[in-house]
Image (cartoon, grey):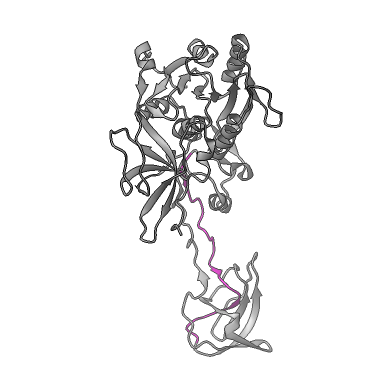
Amino acid sequence: MRADTNSPSDADLDRMWPPDEAQGKVRSLTPLLTVEQVSLRTAVGRYLAANIVAVEDHPPFAAATMDGYAVIAEDASPWREVIAEQMAGGAIAATVTEGTAVRITTGAPIPCGANAVVPVEETEAADDHIVIHQERTVPGANIRPIGSDLRRGDPVLRAGTPLGPAEIGILAGQGLVPVAVRRRPRVSIVSTGDELVEPDRPLGPGQVRDSNRFSLEAAVSETGAETVWSGRAPDILADLRHVLTERIAASDVVITTGGVSMGQLDLVKPLLSELATVHFRRLFLKPGKPLNFATTEAALIFGVPGNPVSALVSFELFIRPALLMMAGAADIDRPRVQVQLDAPLTAGDRIEFQRAMVFTDETGLLHASSTGAQQSSRLSSFLGANALLIIVPRAEPYAAGERVEALLLGAPAGAAS
């Protein structure tokens, strides 16, 4: 863990940090995890730890791109004696000369002497000969040259690239196995609050089902990080201290939900001051004002608010980028775009990240519509949302047609009907 040489003062802890400043603090203290060598099958979704250059020409030989006959293109005669057959996976000793051809399959090496392939559908077989019906054969036709996909020494993939199907295929084709990637961040999620019960349990008086823990598990999984522990802790100081101490020691990131405000049973906040170095406690942000961020030598700790929307917005703005940064991702930020509002919006007293649906009209202009009531307890405001609108405080409402900045959570939808 990176050390923070500037110990925050009480005044600095309790001021309301602007979101951008808080993000900068988190990133300055986020470590890059160690490198490990893994098989291609387990590398999917991981991030490359080093730049990759081609170590071989690909293809390593000139190859046919379709089934047909390998010939000399300049030979004007339509008749060819078929002298051999070249299949993929081997190489024959035959040499193509004028008046001869070699039957060849897709992907097979071009035999010596040939410089074109005539598609089989452009020929007619006659005993041990073929008749070529196409009027002209061009040198190089239907041949994939040596190194036409990759040349030895070509830059192929940069460090921080996520490994998907194409990247895995290139690594396999180059024989670059195993592959060096960054270790997956290990994450623990701790729900606090005696009012919480498991989703499969009936509700008693004053109880609610624990939804935050499962939303956060899903969000962690989408980053490629690994949730190594997820559970509830009681509102008992000694028990909560034990859980947090254990999880901090075993995790790269610990996420707690609830217990970070000013209530009598908001125990996470004082425990973080005891167990870690706290860097900020409040943000000039809605939702997510009482976000606590702390570090130890071993872990980053995020104490997110208990309201479901606050928890997910906090994850998007602070935890997701930190997890990607730890894992070695080259690109950790969601795209930001300008969008046109389709309806008026009221500005609040803090920077607000409102859930919205962004779509492209027939002219290519990006529009945004709110997902409805924006209370931090209303998780359904995230349903269908593909963006967070960044609403800066001001006295007058935002009018329909105004343009604001949006953080894209997904691709904009097509033109609205």
Q: Nearer the viewer, residue 280 or 98?
A: 280
> Which residues lie in the magenta part?
50-75
Q: Residue at x 62, y 88 (%)?
A: 124
User: Which image quadrant for residue 246?
Assistant: top right
Residue 72: where, in percent of width, then height?
52, 80
Q: Residue at x 55, y 89 (%)?
A: 133
Q: Is residue 33 above or below residue 120?
A: above
Q: Main SS type for the magenta part?
A: loop
Q: Nearer the viewer, residue 31 or 370?
A: 370
Residue 109: where, in percent of width, then height?
58, 68
Residue 61, magenta (yes or no):
yes
Q: Residue extending furthest front? A: 205
Query: Residue 43 vs residue 279: left or right?
Result: right
Q: Residue at x 55, y 13 (%)?
A: 265
Residue 18: where, in percent of width, then height?
35, 27
Residue 265, magenta (yes or no):
no
Query: Residue 80 vs residue 139: left or right?
Result: right
Query: Residue 249 vs residue 414: left or right?
Result: right
